Image (cartoon, rainbow, N blue to C red):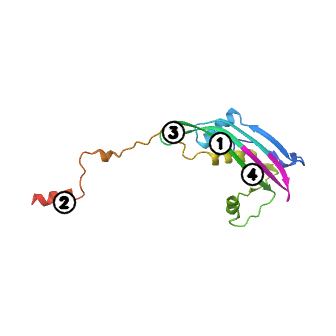
């Protein structure tokens, strides 16, 4: 469980028709998330979600994360602004019996993730945090950033052959 967004919903508080809610992270939560994700800044973070009861004593959490973030350019380390707009869908059940490999198959087919409903608590904050984390650009780059690295050894005026030492021995005789 993540400490950055302690947003939870108790299954006992979800009405028969479902629960719909919008949440926005406070400046302190945004700062904690940026630090935890090792990015420069989370300018804003909000989510709009719905929780419905489903068959098998389960609950389906479905929503969208919208965020404005600032990451360091992989080339120049200058700030790069970005927007995140990502959907999530997770089902929670009192017991989860997934055979080996079924989790990977579900993610490939685009089926909702299935998690254990522990103590009747749906960890909305953790799901939002994980969705944001997975949606960040892994290689943020400024449009004008150029990579101009040169090998310092290539700047040497004369390249030395690997056989140079042998040639010196030959001429000394």
Q: Earlier in the sequence, mark 2 or mark 1?
A: 1
Q: Earlier in the sequence, mark 2 or mark 4?
A: 4
Front-most of 109 and 165?
109
How far apart are the two marked residues, 1 and 4, measured between alpha carbons? 16 Å
Q: Residue furthest left?
A: 173
Q: Are marks 1 and 4 in contact (CB under 8 Å)?
A: no
Q: Which mark is residue 89?
A: 4
Magenta region, residue range: 50-64
Give the residue number, with chain letter if any, for mark 3. 143
- Residue 119 image offset from top left, x and y in percent: 81, 52
Q: Are marks 2 and 1 in contact (CB under 8 Å)?
A: no
Front-most of 106 and 146?
146
* Residue drawn at 68 percent across, 65 percent down: 101
Label 2 or label 4, whichever lies nearer to me, is 4
Give the residue number, with chain letter if any, for mark 2. 166
Give the residue number, with chain letter if any, for mark 1. 84
In the rendered structure, the answer to whether residue 142 lies left or right of residue 153 reads: right
In the rendered structure, the answer to whether residue 171 lies left or right of residue 103 reads: left
How many residues crowd around disc 3 within 10 Å: few (fewer than 14), some, or many (20 or more)? few
* Residue drawn at 69 percent across, 40 percent down: 66
Q: Earlier in the sequence, mark 1 or mark 4?
A: 1
- Residue 79 image offset from top left, x and y in percent: 54, 35
Label 3 or label 1, whichever lies nearer to me, is 3
Q: Is residue 169 magenta?
A: no
How far apart are the two marked residues, 3 and 4, measured between alpha carbons? 33 Å
How many residues crowd around disc 1 within 10 Å: few (fewer than 14), some, or many (20 or more)? some
How many residues crowd around disc 2 within 10 Å: few (fewer than 14), some, or many (20 or more)? few
Q: Quadrant of the C terminus?
A: bottom left
Magenta-drawn stretch, dominant element (helix, strand or loop): strand
Label 2 or label 1, whichever lies nearer to me, is 1
């Amino acid at each position: 469980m993540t400490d950055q967004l302690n947003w939870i919903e108790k299954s006992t508080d979800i009405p028969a028709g479902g629960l719909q809610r919008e949440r926005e992270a406070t400046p302190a939560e945004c700062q904690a998330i940026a630090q935890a994700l090792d990015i420069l800044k989370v300018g804003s973070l909000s989510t709009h979600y719905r929780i419905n009861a489903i068959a098998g004593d389960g609950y389906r959490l479905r929503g969208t994360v919208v965020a404005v973030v600032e990451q360091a350019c992989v080339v120049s380390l200058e700030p790069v602004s970005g927007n995140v707009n990502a959907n999530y869908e997770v089902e929670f059940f009192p017991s989860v019996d997934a055979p080996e490999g079924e989790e990977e198959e579900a993610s490939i087919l685009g089926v909702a993730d299935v998690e254990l409903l522990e103590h009747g608590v749906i960890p909305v904050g953790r799901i939002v945090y994980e969705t944001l984390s997975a949606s960040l650009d892994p290689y943020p780059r400024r449009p004008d950033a150029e990579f101009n690295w040169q090998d310092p050894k290539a700047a040497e005026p004369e390249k030395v052959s690997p056989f140079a030492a042998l040639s010196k021995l030959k001429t000394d005789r």
